[in-house]
Amino acid sequence: MSECPICSRPSHENDSLCQYHQHAHKNLREAYEVWIHALDIDWTSYLDHVYAVDGLGSWVREVIEHIKSEDGSLE
Amino acid sequence: MVYALGHLFELRQTEKGWKYPRLSTEWVPRYEVDKKATATKPIIRVIKSISKDIDHFVVATDLDIEGSLIGYLTLLYACGAEVKEAKRMIFSTLTKAELNAAYDNLASGLDFPMIEAGQARHEVDWLYGINLTRALTLAIKTASGWFKIVSTGRVQGPTLALVADRDQAINVFVPTPYWVILATGSHNSHELELEYSKKRIAVKTQALDIVQDLKGKTAIVDDLRSKKNFQTPPAPFNLSALQSESYRHFGFKPSRTLAIAQKLYLEALISYPRTGSQKIPPSINVREILNGLASYRKYSSLAKQVLAGGSLTPFQGKKDDAAHPAIHPTGTKASKRLTPSESKIYDLIVRRFFALFGKNSIKESIRADVKYNEHLFYLRGLKVLKRGWMDYYDPYVTLNERLLPPLSKGDVIELEAVNEDGRFTSPPPRFNPSSLLKILEKEGLGTKATRASIVDSVRSRGYTLGNRFELSTLGYALHETLRQYVAKILSADFTRQLEEEMQGILEGRLDRDQVLTHAKEDLLELLKHFQTQEEDIGQTLVSGLQRYWKEKEEVGLCPKCGVGNLLIIRSPKTGKRFVGCSEYKEGGCDQTFPLPQRGTIAPLDKQCPYCGHHMIKVISGRRAWETCVNWTKCPGRQEDLKALEKKREKASQARQEGSSDE
């Protein structure tokens, strides 16, 4: 079993993230559709905007940091 | 006459060894099981010695499951009495009059269904609590050799699951944007706040178009509606309503409210607090209570007002409890001065009691539809026409009155300011002690007497951080493990089913042995399944614990040596905690930082914006704040420190003045 690169929890073989960060990532993707509809925004700006919003879940925040980091290979 | 001091007897396993499964138990003096319960030993001795030449026994413990069980076990094991011949005193307040009446009208026998239900609850809770806690603890020992007690239980498991589910929903929440239209208008020099009919606009350009359409325009009152609402008084207090109202007004945790209410009950100032009832039965002499309250200077005028009102029929709620009425004052004068917290709870109970005799309040709600082309606004007003019971329940009434100027159909409203306001959706709120208690009640988990302590135990065992019920890494480790390997123990349905079976014993539908046999079968199945996976369970818990300890203690890389880690350390000499470098012994790094000594400290994965040092979160009581480890020297925090010093000086001055007055 491999490890989640964000929190070191066990992760499924086909996916690099643990169940929690995987869920956070799925929500981040789904919410992007709402943001595009609302603001006609590109993915990178979306990540910047949503990162600054109060109420963003801490696991989603970690996923964004991971995506933005050099080794973030989710996209 | 002797007192008991809570439970004098506890369950103990009959077979030896700190192992599982252990299914057979016996009742033994509490001091034999709980080393801290030394105070029970002399009481049991006294009870035994005075029981020798007794003709008949009367049990006068609280009339509920625990009280009845305490009385029964004391009779059986301390008095050596024939329990079937004992009599029972039944009362709901500790006033002299009621105690005399209860003694004159003794119930012919003990309440055996209640005793059986109480025994079953203790036995089932013991079976699940002891066996599952041992299973988890021994799994850790097998996997790592450590002895770290990790506990769970029949109600604690589903409570943990509720907190974990909410925590996860918050952690994976992604806010999405929406816009609201904020508009103000004027009519005959009155400024009006208008509410746009569409509450949320999902697209920014649409919100901007609406603003563009409406700026500087004149709208017309298209329709006017008013409605009168009659509001009955609030129902008499049962325990959960008192706990919820006390949290709302004073911020008291449910367990604190219960402890205060218990003190007031023992002082004979209020009726028995562990009740589910929202009814004041006709057998309670409300006139006498009101007369008693009239002798208090504080309540004299309100009590006299109620007494002058004629019919003294209190408003009744829906819920009933066969054993005790709703919580109410007795009208008896306090024999000693109440503490500020006791005064608050007593005041709440007294004013709620007065409110029961008040007339319905009448509120008028008005809605004006204001139109400009296809755009519709609402103007809402709320006016209290008749306060009724609210006069008695002040200051605990929230009115939210909004007065509108006189308006008629066709009136013109000038739209003065129209703007769009960008907002974001919010995550679900975290539980607080009161909301968690409410959901436990809704889910049928625990009893009115145990819920408050269950809420406290989730926190005291380190599964959550502070009163905000944020799940700790330890909480996650336990929840993950239980969900993966013994999901049944997290299931509210499973616990609810057991609660229903125990209710069945209370109602005489089920037999205690039947329920216990069933509970043991279920438990054995769970434990068998557990044993086959003990190694894996242990590993999962160990890695969770390692993450927990690491997160709890490790602050980050040492800024001085760049090699060691800054750790939260407690000095063995002074007992005070501070931050120190892990390279102190080997590398000689003497970097240290002071820490606040009160509250819980959680290292944060971020740096101070002013000085670049590691940040920490301090959670103390209901307050939580973030600061850096360098807080005493950080240039960005000097103002806060000065303010804190001033506050301390002021407090110490006030204390000195207070002591010199005395």
Image: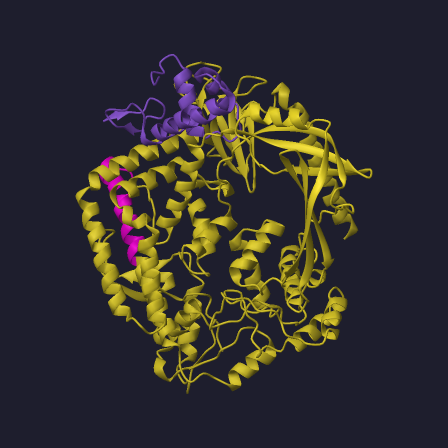
x, y percent for residue B596:
56, 33
Residue at image location 47% in from the left, 20% down from the top: A46
Residue at image location 55% in from the left, 68% down from the top: B326
The magenta segment is B127-146
Magenta stretch, overall SS? helix
Res. B48 image quadrant:
bottom left
x, y percent for residue B253:
54, 51
Residue at image location 60% in from the left, 68% down from the top: B328
Colour assigned to chain A in the rendering is purple
Question: Looking at the image, is B80 positioned above or below residue B146?
Answer: below
Res. B626 image quadrant:
top right
Question: Looking at the image, is B388 positioned above or below residue B223?
Answer: below
Residue at image location 75% in from the left, 74% down from the top: B308
Pick the front one: B570 or B381: B381
x, y percent for residue B118:
37, 67
Res. A57 image quadrant:
top left
Question: Looking at the image, is B52 positioned above or below residue B133?
Answer: below
Residue furthest to the right? B189
Specify whether residue B131 is painted magenta.
Answer: yes
Horizontal placement of B320 versus B642: left or right? left
Horizontal placement of B552 versus B357: left or right? left
x, y percent for residue B93:
56, 73
Pick the front one: B399 or B535: B399
Question: Looking at the image, is B43 positioned above or below residue B186?
Answer: below
Horizontal placement of B48 versus B434: left or right? left
Q: The yellow chain is which one?
A: B
Specify whether residue B356 is painted magenta.
Answer: no
